[in-house]
Image (cartoon, rainbow, N blue to C red):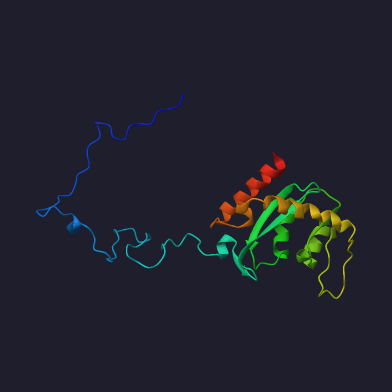
Amino acid sequence: MGRRAADPWSPEDALQPICSLGREGRVDGHLLRFGVCWRAAGRSTDRLIGGQSASLRGWRKRGERSQAIGRSRGGRTTKIHALTDGDCRPLAFLLTGGNVADCTAAEVLLERLPATSILHGDKGYDSDAVRRQIEGMGVAPNIPPKANRLWKNCFSPFLYRDRNAIERMFGRIKDFRRIATRYDRLERNFLAAVCLVATVCYWL
């Protein structure tokens, strides 16, 4: 049995006073005129009535940059960086703006890397810093070198076929329209949706 909520209109509650309607029976004289900027004393950070600006709460981050949204060739987009195992099961996700380089997200994702002997990565993760971090963990990086590299690193196209596991994972979670097209304004909401879909698809 559940608990019953208290009746908000119990007889014991006192009625709130109502302003008088005046002689003409109208209440417009008691209301603020349209366009008048008014605020209560001590509430300097509240939204101003009749103002044109957003909320003045300085502690809250606003804007696209703080919500993993960046302008790329396709417009304002969000990148989903992921780390998966050989069975397509996702291990970690990270969101960045569409204008952020892929190699900048590798440092955070590699912290969740399990014990393995070889790591396949997209060409966007080809940087000296990422390769040193992978090799420092005792793992061999198999990342195709970028075209502008003067010295090409060792790369096996045959072993690189196993990287299709992450492509299949992305193809499956993007069957959900909410993931394929970001509708969430906040980064935490979109990341929660990505993790929820991945859990349903691969871990349940």
Q: Is residue 59 left or right of residue 134?
A: left
Residue 140 appears in view: no
In the drawing, does residue 151 fall left or right of residue 52?
right
Left or right: 199 in relation to 130? left
Q: Quadrant of the C terminus?
A: top right
Question: Which residue is more in the foreground, 127 or 49?
Answer: 49
Q: What is the total number of numbered labels drawn onto the structure image?
A: 0
- Front one among 23 and 152: 23
Residue 86 image point, x, y percent = 81, 48
Q: Position of residue 79 (x, y in %)?
A: 66, 61
The reply to whether residue 187 is in sight is yes
Residue located 14% across and 51% down the image: 21
- Residue drawn at (28%, 63%), measured in percent from left and top? 38
Residue 202 position (above or below residue 78): above
Check the image and report above or below for 33 versus 196.
below
Image height of 50 relative to 8, above or below = below
Which of the 4 image quadrants contains residue 133?
A: bottom right
Viewer-proximal residue among 107 and 144: 144
Q: Position of residue 58 (x, y in %)?
A: 45, 62
Specify the farthest residue to the top: 1
Q: Quadrant of residue 68?
A: bottom right
Q: Position of residue 14 (x, y in %)?
A: 22, 37
Please name the residue shown 66% across and 56% down the image.
Answer: 94
Q: Residue at x 73, y 51 (%)?
A: 169
Furthest-left residue in view? Answer: 23
